Amino acid sequence: MLSVQPDTKPKGCAGCNRKIKDRYLLKALDKYWHEDCLKCACCDCRLGEVGSTLYTKANLILCRRDYLRLFGVTGNCAACSKLIPAFEMVMRAKDNVYHLDCFACQLCNQRFCVGDKFFLKNNMILCQTDYEEGLMKEGYAPQLIV
């Protein structure tokens, strides 16, 4: 967890070992840092600018994206079966995970927006229209997912 604190008396920076004379300093991992010194070990982004969370593993300080890229769990999209990188945003329906671009009705390809109703039948995502047509034709009753 990162915290920005006003500097009351000069402290040593854990990154460069120089005294911190700036108006604000960062406290992370029970150490104090210059804003420029607390960076992701992979991409060099300034962690104080990308949010209030950092990740540490294997003696590395990392941003969320690089932590997930290096240590996150990947999986496969339920629609296209291609790999989904751990850092990528996904949509979920029950135990299925989808790329954002693949989260669409699997009969008519209508993309779903947040709040749209969709239905799951034999691990197929259906829009309300295709669900209702299927009820009339085949008499199936998929589970409603909201």
Image (tube, rainbow, N blue to C red):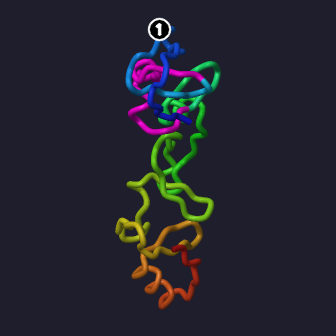
Q: Is residue 53 magenta?
A: yes
Coordinates of residue 4 in the picture (x, y in percent)? 46, 33
Residue positioned most to the bottom: 136
Mark 1 crowd level (few <14, some 14–19, many ≥20, 10 Å Cα): few
Question: Residue at point 49% right, 40% down?
Answer: 87
Vertical position of residue 136 compared to residue 74: above or below: below
Q: Is residue 45 magenta?
A: yes
**Residue type pointed to by label 1:** Arg
Read off the residue under disc 1: 18
Front-most of residues 83 and 54:
54
- Magenta span: predominant SS is loop
Front-most of residues 71 and 30:
30
Tell me where residue 123 sits by quadrant: bottom right
Coordinates of residue 67 in the picture (x, y in percent)? 54, 31
Coordinates of residue 82 in the picture (x, y in percent)? 49, 45
Coordinates of residue 48 in the picture (x, y in percent)? 43, 31
Question: Residue at point 55% right, 64% down?
Answer: 93
Vertical position of residue 71 compared to residue 106: above or below: above
Magenta stretch, residue numbers: 31-54
Compared across the picture, whether 133 is left or right of 60 comes to left
Question: Residue at point 45% right, 22% down?
Answer: 39
